[in-house]
Amino acid sequence: MKKYDEGLKSIRELLGQEGVVEKDNHEPYITEWRGLWRGNCSLIARPASTQEVSGVVKICNEHNISIVPQGGNTGLVGGAVPNGGIVISTQRMQRIIDVDPINMTLTCEAGCILKNLQTASENAGRLFPLSLAAEGSCSIGGNLSTNAGGIQVLRYGNTRDLVLGIEVVLPNGEVWNGLRALRKDNTGYDIKHLFVGGEGTLGIITSAILKLFPAHKQKETALVAVSKVSDAIELLSKITSAAGDSLTAFELMNNYSFNLPIKYINGIRQPFTNKHNWYILIELTSPQEGRNLRAIIEKTLLTAVDQKVVEDAILAETLNQAQDFWKIRESIPEAQGEEGGSIKNDITVPISKIPEFLNRANKIVETIIPKIRPVSFGHAGDGNIHYNLTQPEDMDRKTFLNQWHIITNAINEIVADLNGSFSAEHGIGQLKIKELQQYRPGIEVQLMKIIKHSIDPKNIMNPGKLFDL
């Protein structure tokens, strides 16, 4: 313990008073924002530069102090919650280093808030397309470490697809500078992709070079009602054929999830006169002025109505109306919390299998817990469904949440049978360690462990996340 305490003392001396947070003020750093996990740690380190991160990690390596890297602490699987050791927060590392509209890149530190990067890109006449509900508080370092998805994956890909280079502090404190703004670089293994999606288990991302795209000059948004999930998938096929790469988002919501924000969130109203079983939010965008996106979406929807694939549709006439449509979709997780306990599943299956998944999952969860209320919504355009489940009205929260693993195990069996994934965009953290062992081939998990041991032999980087060692 003496060596451990000496290490903490050295960190305090290195960072000074502004660079550390002592125990009385740890709560925001050790508590998961939904209250599902509450951890503990000896110290919160808040370095202001890569050099300071390196210095702290060297001390931790020497004194065997475990490290939990943390950005905005907005994760959903407990990956940033500490269980001992220290937290290294990137909150003070928020510099946008460079925006290059010619090379179409943005270079920044890991603590930059995603919304600020979007704004900086817009100011340069460019687009950084990563967009998710927590964009006002999540940091790009966390987005990279979890390979965040979001609402525009259909067109632009996950975070992994949006990064050209990164800088990383390794578990021994050494700095790997992989900040190369190149589209082509065939020089061996692409090392950055070990750390993107690595959930902080291999090192701490301190800076990144991100891809930018031409800004959207046209945008059309439609809210569509259908009777069956199979109709939604048929409409996806139609709009994909008609719009091509202009299709930016295709978001699916069941009736229950759609109406939760209308019930609980101020300023949201019901846009349809009649009730429908399923709703779809479609968005087309283009960087070109001349393309008539409205004609494309109107023609596709009119044909779908004539073929009885679509029951009703509303095209946004103004930017404010489009934002109102998006507010419904983006407010579902917040509104669901008002209905009681929630068991959350972040799954992905082949797009063609979405109707089968939902049909089988609804039947089995109703068998396990009668009157359970599925909150089904998500990015149907890339096969990612957030299959959340709200407690029955006549069941108390604790009893319901005690069924978490029984419910998720049953759902994961269906997902596996359909060749899907139990974790689409939220990662593993500490929530899904058993699932990784169960549903990924043994050789795949073993390779991950070999990589982990090779880079972090002392297991000081985010121990207890991804897998048990």
Image (cartoon, grey):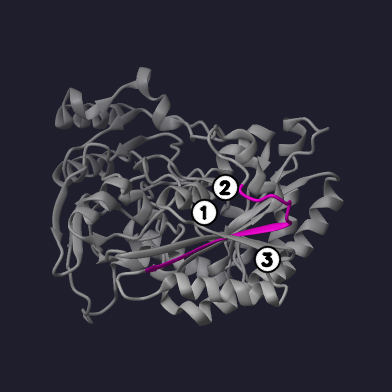
For the residues labelled 2 and 3, say whether their Cβ atoms are less than 8 Å apart: no
Q: Which SS class for mark 1?
A: loop
Depth check, front residue: 467 or 399: 399
Q: Does 256 lie within the magenta span? A: no
Which picture quadrant has residue 233? bottom right
Residue 42 at x, y = what percent?
Answer: 36, 28
Asked if the magenta segment contains residue 273, the reply would be yes
- What residue type is disc 2 on? Leu
Residue 177 is situated, as x and y percent measured from the top left of the image, at: 17, 61
CB atoms of marks 1 and 3 within 8 Å: no
In the figure, residue 268 lies in which quadrant? top right
Which residues, given as a range, are shown in magenta? 271-285
Q: Which residue is located at x 21 percent, y 29 percent?
A: 19
For the residue pair 462 and 256, the one nearer the viewer reads as: 256
Instruction: Identify residue type, mark 3.
Output: Val
Question: If the image is split into quadrants, where does the N terminus sit?
Answer: top left
